[in-house]
Image: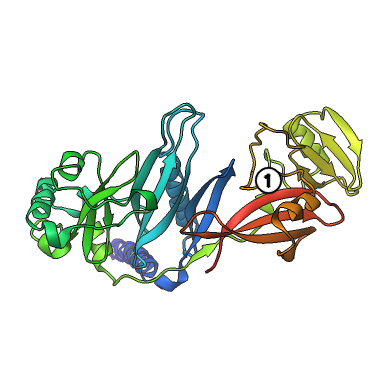
Amino acid sequence: MTRRIGLLLALLVLVSFFVAEVSSCLAATRQDPGDIKIVRHLLYSVDEDDIFIPQISGMGDATLQTRINKEIEQFVLSLRNPSPESSLKGDFEVSFYNGNLLGIHLWCFSYTRGAAHPNKFDTGIHVDLNTGQVYSLVDLFKAGTDYNSRIKELCFHNETSYRLRNNNHWADCIEDDWTYEAPFACYWPSQGEFLLRADSIRVYVSDAVCGAISGYSVPYSDLMDIIDTDSSLWKAISSRGSSAIAVESEALTADDFIIKGIRLGDSAASVVQRLGQPVSTTQIRDGISYDYDDIQVVIGTRNTVVNIITGEWKPGQQFGFIATHKGICPGYSLMEVTRRYGTDSTVTHFADYDLYEYSFNADSHQQYILRFAVKQGTDTVSYIGSRISER
């Protein structure tokens, strides 16, 4: 009798554990799609090469959110040419979202010094927001199915109704004169891409030189006989209708002032520990400047970092920080900023800084807000950044 009671109690414990796990999973999938937002994060900006990447906020599982954001960041960085002297510039849009699945469409180019032209990329990443799994096209179809041949066959027989037209982000390279045979059939899927939509798959090839796109939009309804309707990818696509999701500009925070691992508020001892003894020290209005070869770290009266300046700019000199379209670099005076950009700016305050913001058009598609931060009580620019204009 005692043994039977013990077994029953053990069974009850297992059942309660199972119910708790199921409830947890259901709670995760029930997260309101409206709770999640995408932040347009400026990963870095050097010599006018801005690379914006999406970073998720608002997920209930903070650990999973961090893992997904890191996965997206690594995916974007993997597009850079392998040479250490290569740059990376680009942006993104949300191509699919329904609370369970997030699709990100990225377009960028990477240039290697000495090369004839940059390599251009137009690609996508699809992430399950409940598990963090990054999906490939094969995950949508039944095992053993030759889905590539089937998709190409459908594109061939539905050339007019499936065809994509003028759908690329390189305004000077829009072309409509491509054919099914070239370049689409020649390079998809070996050098081609896909993007999942609410009702179709976009399959396409992007020319690495000019970025022109050839491709098709294939309805799921024409593929249902080979789609694995029990797959996690199909369930993620079909579980909910697509939803709008906000893409927000990144707010300026103290972390934006980090240079070489030094941030505002760090102790003087931590600066020396990280950067070594300064080449020299100089008494200035803010306090004492620890002068290194390429930056100055200003230590205030409380023996903490109150300002970081990347030094005086010289023609041909490059900083590992941020430059702008009109040649202003950290270390320039505010007078030089107003001389080049004018006085028509918005001035706000952030901690001990005055933040000057100017609108400018980087290209024909997007307006940006250029930001200069100046330490209060000084006339020296110590931070330069930009954000997308909300227009």
Quarter placement of the N terminus:
bottom left
Quick check: can you spot residue 229?
no
Looking at the image, residue 295 lies above or below residue 59: above
Q: Residue at x 63, y 47 (%)?
A: 324
Looking at the image, residue 140 lies above or below residue 99: above
Q: Quick check: 264 left or right of 224?
A: right
Q: Which amino acid, by three-letter code, is at mark 1?
A: Ile
**Residue 227: x and y, percent?**
14, 57
**Residue 193: x and y, percent?**
27, 47
Residue pointed to by mark 1: 258
| Picture colour scheme | rainbow
Q: Quick check: 240 left or right of 375?
A: left
Quick check: can you spot residue 289?
yes
Looking at the image, residue 25 lies above or below residue 302: below
Q: Quick check: 257 left or right of 361?
A: right
Disc 1 crowd, CA 10 A, few/some/many (<14, 14-19, 20+): few
Q: Which quadrant of the figure has residue 309? A: top right
